[in-house]
Image (cartoon, helix red, strand yellow):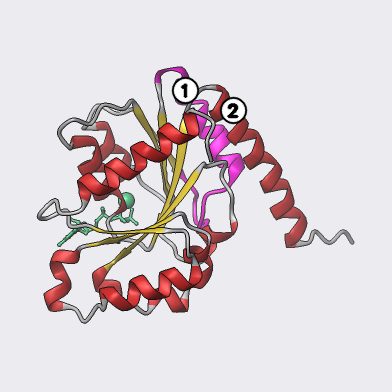
Amino acid sequence: MKIVAAKSILKANDQLAGENRARFRQAGVFCVNMTGSPGCGKTTLLEHLFSSPGYAGSPGVIEGDLAGQVDAERIEKLGIPVVQINTDGMCHLDASMIAAAVEGLNLDELDLLWIENVGNLVCTAGYDLGEHLRLVVLSVPEGDDKIIKYPAIFQRSDALIITKVDLAPYCSFDLVKARADMKRLAPAAEVFEVSAKSGDGMPQVAAWLAGRQKEASSGHP
Ligand SMILES: Nc1nc2c(ncn2[C@@H]2O[C@H](COP(=O)(O)OP(=O)(O)OP(=O)(O)O)[C@@H](O)[C@H]2O)c(=O)[nH]1
Ligand SMILES: [Mg+2]
């Protein structure tokens, strides 16, 4: 009987992720992997960033969901190239799915590739997709304790985006504690507070991303 250890599956994924990253770099495309629970506001964040005045990039999007194409349709409405992956029950995307999805995009026409991962705070943490930057989105109604309870995804992210801050008066989400917990797990990570209702915090996220993209294209870390 042949037994395949999870470790070797992850190793194979890492190799494919490295190939994806090299392909993105060669095409001059900066890739962002966005994770977070179902309904935390990932697609809404993309809609805001793409619609914000002065947005000048050429983005493309890969949407990951168990089923359906609702999110891809939202992105398509904005005139942005998008490919929907249906994982058919899998709780995360992996590097082979991204390699296949990229075939549906013309990388030469893009400078930024967003991957909206399947809504999940656990499984998505273990899979490198070939991204240059990983974001984790946490919404105020989920509670500030999620950072402590699901540490891996927060530890492995370059930024935490706290969404739905307009709901803070109705939920006991301690923003100071959330920032402190994130600092402990990922000292170098940025933390943003945003609201899609008011638009607060969106320009700061857009400016930070543009800076990271610029650094990457000029060969800086
Ligand atoms: N009040 C408030 N609602 C928000 C905000 N951002 C998103 N929402 C709402 O939250 C719900 C879920 O938003 P989505 O953007 O679809 O969430 P998602 O993370 O993409 O969801 P999945 O792809 O299903 O995991 C929608 O009803 C949004 O209108 C926000 O900043 N404030
Ligand atoms: Mg979504």
* Quadrant in which residue 192 is drawn: bottom left
Picture residue at 65% right of the left edge, 39% below the top? 18
Q: Which residue is the site of mark 2?
A: 23
Q: Is residue 25 left or right of residue 70?
A: right
Q: Is residue 176 left or right of residue 156?
A: left
Picture residue at 45% right of the left edge, 65% below the top? 121
Q: Is residue 156 above or below residue 95?
A: below
Q: Is residue 55 above or below residue 32?
A: above
Residue type at mark 1 is Leu
- The answer to whether residue 70 is seen in the rendering is no
- The answer to whether residue 176 is seen in the rendering is yes
Mark 2 surroundings: few (<14), some (14-19) or many (≥20) residues within 10 A: some
SS at mark 1 in the image: helix
User: Does mark 2 have its CB less than 8 Å from ligand 2?
Assistant: no
Q: Earlier in the sequence, mark 2 or mark 1?
A: 2
The alpha-carbon separation of the residues under discs 2 and 1 comes to 9 Å
Frontmost residue, 28 versus 150: 28
Mark 1 surroundings: few (<14), some (14-19) or many (≥20) residues within 10 A: some
Picture residue at 30% right of the left edge, 73% below the top? 142
Residue 207 drawn at (x, y percent) = 28, 41
SS at mark 2 in the image: helix
Frontmost residue, 193 versus 5: 193
Residue 60 drawn at (x, y percent) = 37, 31
Q: Which residues are magenta?
A: 86-109
> Magenta stretch containing residue 145, yes or no?
no
Q: Is residue 16 above or below residue 173?
A: above
Q: Is residue 180 left or right of residue 124?
A: left
* Quadrant in which residue 179 is drawn: bottom left
Q: Which residue is the site of mark 1?
A: 107
Q: Is the N terminus in the top left, top right, bottom left or bottom right quadrant?
A: bottom right
Frontmost residue, 164 versus 116: 164
